Amino acid sequence: MDDTVRPFSELIRTATRAQHTEAESSGFLSAMLAGDLGLEGYARYTEQLWFVYRALEETAAALRDDPVAGPFVRPELMRLPALERDLAHLRGPDRWREAVPLPVTEEYAARIAACARDWPAGYVAHHYTRYLGDLSGGQIIRGTAEKTWGFARKGDGVRFYVFDSVPNPAAFKRDYRARLDALPLDDDGRRRVVDECRRAFTLNAALLRALEGEFPATVRAL
């Protein structure tokens, strides 16, 4: 099908499949979800996510009225308060603030902030790769974490993955994709957004590889 008539959301999904698969098949994620890394692996991952979502959400207010990014700034998606509650539970109410981002996490967060400041359509690319992933594969992580480490269902420790303000995730994702399809972009703008989505997945995969280096148990999962 000609890319000029394909829904943009479908084009993004198919064009980023390889990068998405690379991130999804991470040895770190596999080992973490198998319980091989202990609670420390899960906590370390959650710490790094906080830096990424701070970059996404502290810049969101300035984009609320932007014609490109504004339709995606949805209060029901905001994750920082839930992340902070999870980290307080995992690390302690004060200790979690001592976390330091990995170099690749800093690069990832800086790229999001740069897009938010200079290129709202690029911000949308990062928004899409993170939040739709949270509503989809993130639910597998939540369920596994609850079983593996005994967190209360949808309670402290997994609140990041709980979207109580999104009662119908399937309908929400359909609406989100319709917003992607309606983005006011020309062909070049669409190509740039697709490339930025690939970059977002690649940065996420690099973050997971960096975490692999901290946990020898990931070697068995590769």
Image (cartoon, helix red, strand yellow):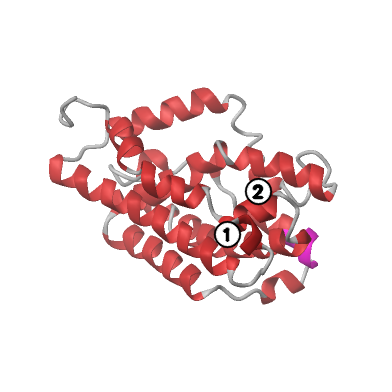
Please say if 4 is above or below 122.
above
Q: Position of residue 106 (x, y in %)?
A: 47, 72
What kind of residue is marked 2? Phe
Rendering quarter of residue 49: bottom right
The dot on residue 49 is: 1
Residue 50 pos. (x, y %): 59, 61
Residue situated furthest front in the rendering: 220
Q: Secondary structure at mark 1?
A: helix
Q: Determine the residue positioned at 37% across, 41% down.
A: 17
Indicate yes or no whether the magenta region holds residue 88: yes
N-term mark: 2 or 1: 1
Residue ID at (60%, 42%)? 138
In this rendering, the answer to whether 112 lies above or below 198 is below
10 Å neighbourhood of mark 1: few (<14), some, or many (≥20)?
many
Residue nearest the viewer, comparing 206 with 130: 206
Q: Which residue is mark 2?
A: 160
Q: Tell me the quarter of the image containing the C terminus.
A: bottom right
Distance Cα–Cα, label 2 vs label 1: 10 Å
Q: Name the secondary structure under disc 2.
A: helix
Q: Which mark is residue 16?
A: none
Q: Which residues are magenta?
A: 87-92
Q: Residue at x 14, y 40 (%)?
A: 187
Residue 136: within the magenta? no
Judge from the rendering whether residue 21 lies leftward or rightward of residue 184; answer left or right. Answer: right
Tell me where residue 163 appears, x and y as whole percent. Answer: 63, 37
* Horizontal side, residue 11 vs residue 30: left or right: left
Tag 1: amino acid:
Leu
Would residue 68 be found to the left or right of residue 96 on screen?
Answer: left
Magenta portion: prevailing SS class: helix
Q: Are marks 2 and 1 in contact (CB under 8 Å)?
A: yes
Q: Quadrant of the N terminus?
A: top left
